Image (cartoon, grey):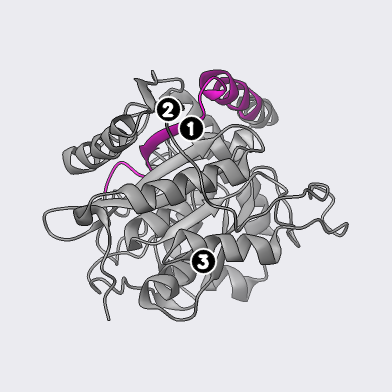
């Protein structure tokens, strides 16, 4: 449940770009390995941004596909798996290898004739939204905002129709879903042995604890918010071929911090206002580097697509990878 590489099991996973920076999470090992060049394709799982956040903060590419596109051994509503790699072509290779049905995952999608390696597309005439204010969460850092706007200009200059997408969520939605997760994982925490409880990262133990005395009514209220967010996301985005947004409102933070704001476990997931909606709606969403901060930290552009339009979303991501200016192309360390 952390968006960092901080772990009581394996210590701190640090960025190959700079060991003082977080690699992101929760798929921190996959992000670090992809950025460092340890193999070609690495897999992570994503319930609120956990493949897109490490991709964004390490400069690599990823696709969180439609829910059920990649089968999972432990499916959960909103949870997807996705490949991380240095290039979109390698992400496509990852999808080619693992995006197939498996009846052991009762949520997996039926077989689809998708040529993942066909990445050619044209953006001329496409209707693209740019989304810079989700209506909730942490404010977008100026450098992140500027990089996303430059990416939107790249689409516009190539002939896409680019319009601004208004905010469609609020802080209450983030709080409800955070409360639901606290209740759910308090139950998980209670089921651990004493030895396992002692081994849990103190931040996580503190984060789940409020779930211990939330009422059943509160749990149901929070659960119903998932349906509301799904409805809001589909309604806001269905008229667009894609939505461009920051993956996160900030670039990489200190590696020792469990979350972007530091160590305050009362904060309610205020950094995933751009990523969470597409987990809940099940829509595909990618991350691709679109710039660097003044001190060299990568900035991730999220490109989300219509429901089930996984290949089209990956094609648009590949198009931007090739069209982006030199300063938006990461030069990986090592």
The residue depicted at 24 percent of the width and 62 percent of the height is 254
Residue drawn where x is 79% and y is 50% of the image = 108
For this orientation, the residue located farthest to the left is: 294
Which segment is the magenta one? 226-250
Question: Which residue is at the front of the view, 134 or 10?
Answer: 134
Please tell me the numbered disc located at residue 90: 3
Q: Secondary structure at mark 2?
A: strand
Which element type, helix, strand or loop, lies under badge 1? strand
Residue 143 is situated, as x and y percent measured from the top left of the image, at 18, 43
Q: With 95 as the anchor, is 330 left or right in this view?
A: left
- Where is residue 185 drawn, in percent x and y? 62, 51
Q: Against 289, is 11 above or below?
A: below
Q: Which mark is residue 242?
A: 1
Q: In the depicted view, which residue is nearer to us: 179 or 225?
A: 225
Q: Is residue 131 visible?
A: yes
Report crowding for label 2: few under 14, some 14 to 19, many 20 or more residues within 10 A (C-alpha).
many
Foreground pick, 127 / 256: 127
The residue indicated by pointer 2 is 128
Q: Is residue 241 magenta?
A: yes
Q: Nearer the viewer, residue 173 or 144?
A: 144
């Amino acid at each position: 449940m952390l968006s960092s590489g901080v772990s009581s099991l394996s210590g701190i996973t640090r960025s190959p770009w700079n060991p003082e920076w977080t690699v992101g999470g929760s798929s921190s090992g996959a992000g670090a390995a992809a950025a460092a060049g340890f193999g070609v394709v690495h897999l992570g799982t994503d319930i609120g941004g956990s493949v897109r956040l490490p991709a964004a903060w390490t400069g690599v590419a990823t696709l969180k596909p439609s829910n059920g596109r990649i089968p999972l051994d432990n499916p959960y509503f909103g949870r997807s798996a996705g490949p991380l790699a240095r290039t979109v072509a390698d992400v496509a290779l990852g999808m080619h290898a693992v995006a197939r049905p498996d009846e052991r995952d009762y949520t997996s999608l039926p077989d689809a004739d998708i040529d993942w390696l066909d990445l050619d597309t044209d953006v001329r005439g496409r209707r693209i939204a740019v989304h810079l204010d989700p209506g909730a969460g942490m404010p977008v850092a100026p450098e992140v905002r500027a990089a996303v706007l430059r990416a939107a200009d790249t689409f516009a200059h190539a002939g896409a129709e680019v319009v601004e997408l208004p905010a469609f969520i609020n802080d209450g939605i983030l709080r409800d879903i955070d409360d639901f997760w606290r209740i759910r994982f308090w139950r998980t925490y209670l089921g651990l042995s004493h030895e396992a409880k002692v081994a849990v990262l103190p931040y996580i133990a503190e984060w789940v604890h409020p779930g211990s005395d939330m009422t059943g009514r509160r749990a149901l209220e929070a659960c119903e918010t998932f349906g509301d967010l799904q409805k809001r996301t589909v309604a806001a985005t269905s008229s667009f071929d894609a939505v461009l947004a920051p993956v996160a409102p900030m670039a990489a933070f200190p590696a020792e911090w469990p979350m972007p704001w530091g160590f305050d476990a009362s904060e309610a997931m205020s950094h995933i206002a751009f990523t969470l909606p597409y987990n809940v709606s099940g829509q595909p969403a990618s991350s691709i580097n679109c710039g660097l901060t003044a001190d060299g930290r990568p900035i991730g552009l999220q490109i989300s697509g219509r429901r089930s339009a996984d290949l089209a979303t990956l094609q648009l991501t590949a198009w931007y990878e090739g069209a982006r200016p030199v300063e938006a192309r990461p030069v990986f360390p090592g």
